[in-house]
Amino acid sequence: MLLFGNKFYLIFISLWIFGLYCIFTSFHSTPNNNKVFEDRIEYLQNEVDSLRQKLAQLQSGNNINDQVKVGNENVQCQTLENEMKRLKRALRSKNGGDGTTSSREEPSMEYEKLRRKIEMQARELTYFTTDQLNKISGKLTDDDKQKWDNVILRFADQSRVLLASIRNITEVDGYQLWREREHASLSKLMQARLNSLQSPIKPCENVKRVTCNINKGCGYGCEIHHAMHCFHIAYAIGRPLILFSDGWRYNSGGFDQIFLPPSQNCTTSSATGASSWSNYETADVVEIPLIDNIYPRKDFMPMAVPEDIAERLIRLHGNPFVWFTGQLMKYLLRPQPWLKEFMEKKYESIKFEVPIVGVHVRRTDKVGSEAAFHDISEYMKHVEDYYIIYQYQNPNVNFTKRVFLATDEPAVFSDARSK
């Protein structure tokens, strides 16, 4: 047993040293910010995004004047992009020439993917090793088990330190400002595109469109998921989405009483005589069926992302489809004014502050049918991990540990408080 323990420690130390090597060889020194250059670059990026939005709107029309405007806007867009590239080269030269002694104005695709990969591998290594150690612990005598459990605790703590260090790379590599700006820029672009898609310049009767019935006959999350699939497909084929929701089980008055209508000028009155999905390439109005019933599946269906922003998304986010889905939901679930006011008041009344961990405990109809019962203590292990890592990331910060508990089973609240 002692020999095995020594081997384990040698393996653990080797992995630990290798992990630290990967982290520190990935560091870049913090850039010397030049506000004038950065402000100009940000302005140009916003202008380019704005022009791209105009191009998308103009290209949706068939008018000759619109086509002339498209050509002019394309020239202007290219001019601005060239100026932006020139400024980026100048800033790179000013801050360190070839970029070997100071970091660039934005990270490479390879750097961002490697940084996320290191964190994922460290996390998976922790899960796997902890599971194996617990299996061994269950086979030991009481005396050996106590010693072994101490090894498990030490390993867990060192793993948290490693994860905290990896996550803190984003705070010191000089690229965090770029990440925030890139996210804001892409989000603004996507919301503008969705608004343009759902607000055609022509009368809706003269635009090819799709319909979707939210009444799938399942739970709220399931039906919203179905609506998201419809919206995804509508965006992919460039048609505004018209959502049918009369008699919706979650609000008999329909989706539009709770959330803003997906479109102001394409309503159910302009969606009569919808054709089946098989005619989606030619018919003026097409009904999108349940995604499970679409066959053969097309390349543009979930989990695809828009091709023209795919490279930017892959660099920015570890799961591009999740980000894209978030943008669809951001547009689709815009609350009506009364609901927005209600949520803002609730937000203030519960004093929602950060850091906070959200925990969703689903019971009732799910348990025994498609999910097993999980005690609240199983969830809280992950909450504890989060806060320990957060403390390692922010050693000089005093904070209150908060949990936002959402559940469909009232007994969970008393259970959580007592434990």
Image (cartoon, rainbow, N blue to C red):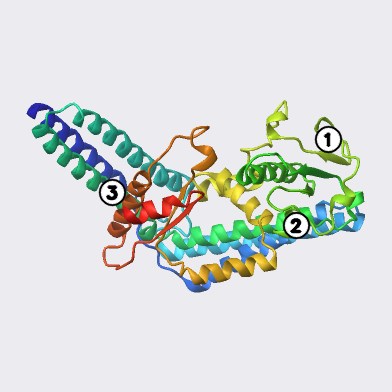
Task: Identify the residue position indicated by label 2 in the image.
Answer: 256
Amino acid type, mark 2 = Asp
3D distance between C-alphas at marks 2 and 1: 28 Å
Coordinates of residue 97 in the picture (x, y in percent): 42, 60
> Residue at 49% across / 46% down in the picture?
109
Say whether disc 1 or disc 3 marks the residue closer to the N-terminus. 3
Eye-nearest disc, 2 or 1: 2
Amino acid type, mark 1 = Glu
> Residue at 31% across / 33% down in the picture?
128
Q: Can you tell which mark lies on residue 160?
A: 3
Coordinates of residue 296 in the picture (x, y in percent): 72, 26
3D distance between C-alphas at marks 2 and 3: 45 Å
Q: Can you tell which mark lies on residue 281?
A: 1
Q: Residues within 10 Å of mark 1 (few under 14, many from 20)?
A: few
Coordinates of residue 176 in the picture (x, y in percent): 44, 60
Q: On screen, 417 above or below 248?
A: below
Q: Can you tell which mark lies on residue 142?
A: none
